[in-house]
Amino acid sequence: MAMRIDADQCIDCGACVEPCPNQAIRRGGEEYTLKNQTYPALSDKFYVIHQLCTQCVGYYDEPQCVNACPVDCITADAAHEESHEQLEAKAKNLKPQK
């Protein structure tokens, strides 16, 4: 499953953005583009685009955003459950082809 940022607890520091290998985390209020289609921001605070989040499967042993968050406001998103195998496949599709 993807990760989610609890906007009520988020202090909007951005510490979670840089360690994300999939660039799945966006600044609040910022639109995002997937497959050449632009979508409105999902939150006024930092947020996770679930289609890009692999919980760092395929890159690291644990979600790097969780480790970076100083207020522990990032958790698994039960609304977007995926198996480890599905996360591996997603990571493979998101990695740049060599």
Image: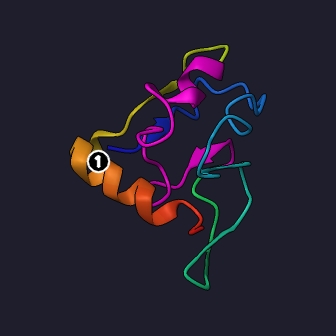
**What percent of the width, then of the height, locates residue 6?**
52, 32
Residue kind at label 1, given as amino acid type = Ala
Q: Image quarter for residue 20?
A: top right
Left or right of 10? Residue 54 is left
- Tell me which residue sits at (73%, 56%) in the image: 29
Position of the N terminus, as image quadrant, is top left
Magenta-highlighted residues: 44-68
Q: Residues within 10 Å of mark 1 (few under 14, many from 20)?
A: few
49 is within the stretch colored magenta? yes
| Count of numbered marks | 1
Left or right of 40? Residue 63 is left
- Tell me which residue sits at (59%, 51%) in the image: 22
Q: Which residue is mark 1?
A: 79
**What percent of the width, then of the height, locates residue 62?**
45, 25
Query: Residue most toward the bottom?
Result: 36
Camera-side residue of 51 and 93: 93
In the rendered view, tell whether residue 75 sits above or below residue 24. Answer: above
Left or right of 10? Residue 55 is left
